[in-house]
Each structure stands twice: as structure tokens, then as C-alpha cells.
Amino acid sequence: MHWDRVRLVVFDLDGTLYDQRRVRARMLLRLLADAARTRSLATLYILRAFRDCREQLGDALATDVAERQYELTAERCGHSPETVKKTVEEWIERRPLDLLPGCRCRGVERVFAGLVTQGKTLAVLSDYPASEKLKALGLSADIVVSSMDPEVGVLKPHPAGLAHVLDRAQVPAEQAIMIGDRVERDWAVAQSHGMQALIRSARPIAGVDTFRSYEDEIFRPVTNQPGWTGAPVSVRSVTISS
């Protein structure tokens, strides 16, 4: 992997910059406490249906997702789109924010700082609103794009969101890399542009370039961790083409 040939690094957010499982586990406790207080499971049902509907919309490469995600969930749950939207904004966008600092991926701040020092352009491309989460994580990027932005309106792996990032950065795909946590979303959208990608994963994935941690060897040329000798670095799966 030749980081000197990379001008733009595009990060996914959820599950890529923080441990999503830990956050969801802690949020589940809050949801159960709220369900006990209100004596209702409606919020849990709405959130589960919302995530399922978004997966369907993403798989279908649907457009105009910003409104359709709420309408489709409302049809399934029997609530109004407005109720669904308010529930999502509260429980997916706002309430988890205080949990994010404690669940930030170890070493990610050093990678961000190293990339900035090397003059790379940093971008975040998320299927959810990203600015407040990024701020809560104590991280910043030059370009922050959400699938819900009016100029986008599609979920990964639809190529339009990443195309928008590349256009804003004015960097060709061959000089960029996507870093995410989902093969079927982040790897796939990068592949649609002929772009390199790295997937955060606890296990190797056949045919996919992966890493376990931001402290892995692949990032040493960026963070200048002790022990890096300057030798070419490859990932655990297959070597990324330069």
C-alpha cells in the first residue's frame, strides 16, 4: 500500500470510526428502560423496522431515500412518517452521542492526524447524518457527506454519494481510498468507482482488503508508529493495487 499515492481518504462513520456493537448494546439498555417507563415497545418496533427498511432501500439502489425511508417504515409499523422521523432523530441521531467518545476506535485519532500532516484530504461518507457524531468523536474532516443530504438522497452502495465526494474533493478515484466496515456497502461502492477500499473486520474476508485496528501495520506509514521500518506494507487479505 503506497499512502504517498493517495490524495483523498473517505471514511464511513458508523462501525468504522467507533465500535457500533458497544454503542448498540448500551442503547438497548436505554431503550428497554424507556419501554418499561412508558409500558410500550413501540419505539423498539419502529427502530427495528426503520433499519430493515433502509437495508431494503440500499439493496434496491433506491433514490429519494430521505423521505421514502420514513414512509416505508410508517407503512410497516402503522405510525405516521412524522412519528417515525421524530423517533429516529431522537434514538439514532441524538441519544447515542454521549456514548461515542468512550466507544471510539483505538488509534483512529492518530490516523486522522497523520493523514492531515501528510496533506491528505479527509472525507466522511455516511448513510446517516454525520456532523454531530463526528464532533462527538472528537474528529473532523474536510468533507462530510450524508446520504440524507439534498444533493445525495441515496444509500450506499449506490455510487452517487461517493461520486459527490470525489467531485467536491476534485480527486480522481484512482487517487482515493474508501475505509469502511461493510463489504456489501463500503467495499461495493468503492468498487463501483474502481477505487481502493479497506474494510474494518475482526476476521479476514476472501478477496477483500481488511484490517482489525487502526494500530495495524497498514497504518504505520501514516502514524509513524515505532517499529515501522519503511518497508512496503500490505493488508491481511490481498495486497491493495497501487
Image (spheres, rainbow, N blue to C red):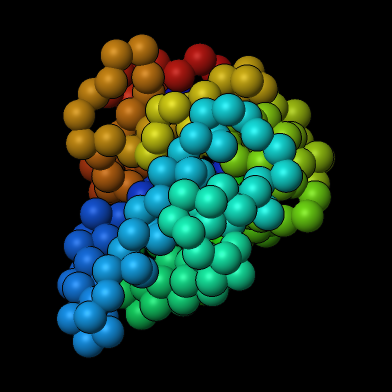
Which residue is depicted at the point 33% across and 29% down? 210
Q: Quadrant of the C terminus?
A: top right
**Picture coordinates of residue 143, whole percent (x, y):** 68, 56
Nearest the eye: 142 or 45:
45
236 relative to 164, above or below? above
Which residue is depicted at the point 50% across and 35% down? 56
Left or right, 138 with reference to 201: right
Left or right, 121 with reference to 199: right
**Picture coordinates of residue 136, whole percent (x, y):** 45, 75
Visible residue check, residue 105: no
**Picture coordinates of residue 230, whole percent (x, y):** 38, 32
Which residue is depicted at the point 46% across and 76% down? 90
176 relative to 80, above or below? above
**Picture coordinates of residue 22, whole percent (x, y):** 22, 60
Which residue is depicted at the point 36% across and 12% down? 207
76 relative to 84, above or below? above
Q: Quadrant of the N terminus?
A: top left
Residue ranking furthest to the front: 78
